[in-house]
Image (cartoon, helix red, strand yellow):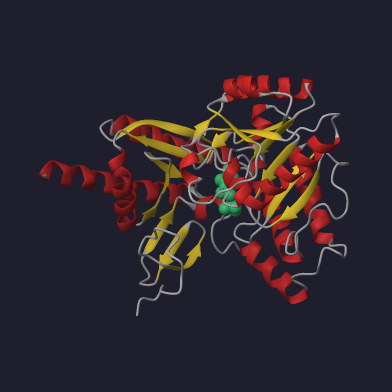
Amino acid sequence: MKEDEYLLPLYKRLDVSFVKGKKSILYDEEGKDYVDFTSGIGVNSLGYANKEVVKTIKEQAKNILHTSNIYRIKSQEKCAKKIVELSNLDMQCFFCNSGAESNESAIKLARKYGNTEFAKAKYKIITIKNSFHGRTIATLKATAQEDKHKFFGPYPEGFVYAKDINEAITLIDESTVAVMLELIQGEGGIFMQDVHKIKELETILKSKKLLLIIDEVQTGVYRSGNFLISQYFGIKPDIITLAKGLSTGIPIGVMMTSLKNIFKAGDHGSTFGGNHMSTTVCTKVLNILEEYSNSGKLEVNIKYFNNYLHYFVDKYPSLFLQKNGWGFMQGLVLNDENKLDEIVKKSLKKGVLVLKSGKNIIRFLPALNISKKEIKQGFERFESSLIEILKEEKRK
Ligand SMILES: *Cc1c(COP(=O)(O)O)cnc(C)c1O
């Protein structure tokens, strides 16, 4: 019997299954260890089995996991305060359970704003080529990768795609309500936007009272070195979405906004969103990360990690074209996209986990508290897989 015969075949899975982890090291069923440079695609911000997080989860489970949002949830109130304070923006939060849901919430909020705040209703949302905003029908349509849209239509109307920020600016018309984008495209190739262009876009949108929505589902929660990459860009978006790294593995999403008077009770909601467990863990994770970032260790280790990537680009020009990315969201761009799967698989065999992005990029999203020792060990294993691939190539 194939053990996965009851699962829909939606993922191209690698044939390994992990049973436990400690910090940035994972162990499979045979006890083999792996250095994890993926953190569950940016989710496990504190790695595995963080002592303080485990303690928080245990204590919370003893008391209460969930009550409905028809009652006050104090841990949710506290968590929202922490998120808003770390953002340094005058905002309020809505809690949900995933990145797609937080973007869906942002789209709904923008639509209500467009439908209520102007004499003639506005509804169009401009998104950027190769973006990724989620897999629900609306967020899939917001994702400007048309090859992904086949088969699932019809879609809600009102999404417009721009090839870059310049084109987004020219596409703004009287029905446009918002521009939504990632400051570094995560799934679409670790592509970072230009700070000046984004500021120009922000100025234009503000002058027309239109909305800037920043999808920080992957870039947020210190992945860039700042709590938000919007802070590094020096912008004040109207809506920001977060999810992946917030609770180091407990599902949670947040849509935060400076628009405090658009949504009224009943306009939107979530059954699970912001429950006692997810928000208690989130506040704990954010406190730990804030302290870690303030200690300077995050910045130092990001530099240490980066030096390795520069080393690989210099040492292996036949494999790598360049390094892309920022903070702990990094990519090595391959000369030959056919090598992508080979490197991921060989690395797995050598005991280090790396991700793909776009067609030709090895993506690195380590836990934010990964140690120098783990980084060194991971890259030694990564290099041994490169050496082996080059050797095998020679033999051919
Ligand atoms: C992962 C991701 C999403 C979707 O998040 P889910 O939790 O899978 O729904 C949306 N936007 C960006 C930028 C992402 O990286």
Q: Residue at x 27, y 44 (%)?
A: 386
Q: Residue at x 11, y 45 (%)?
A: 395
Give the image quarter of residue 142: top right
Q: Position of residue 59 (x, y in %)?
A: 72, 71
Judge by depth and name the residue closer to the eye, 55 or 246.
246
Q: Is residue 63 visible?
A: yes
Q: Which residue is farthest bottom?
A: 1
Q: Residue at x 43, y 40 (%)?
A: 358
Q: Position of residue 91 (x, y in %)?
A: 81, 40
Total numbered labels: 0
Q: Is residue 89 visible?
A: no
Q: Which residue is farthest front?
A: 154
Q: Position of residue 102 (x, y in %)?
A: 68, 49
**Quarter of the image that includes the N terminus:** bottom left
Judge by depth and name the residue closer to the eye, 161 or 86.
161
Would you say 52 lies left or right of 341 here? right
Judge by depth and name the residue closer to the eye, 181 or 152.
152
Give the image quarter of residue 391: top left
Q: Which residue is farthest left?
A: 395
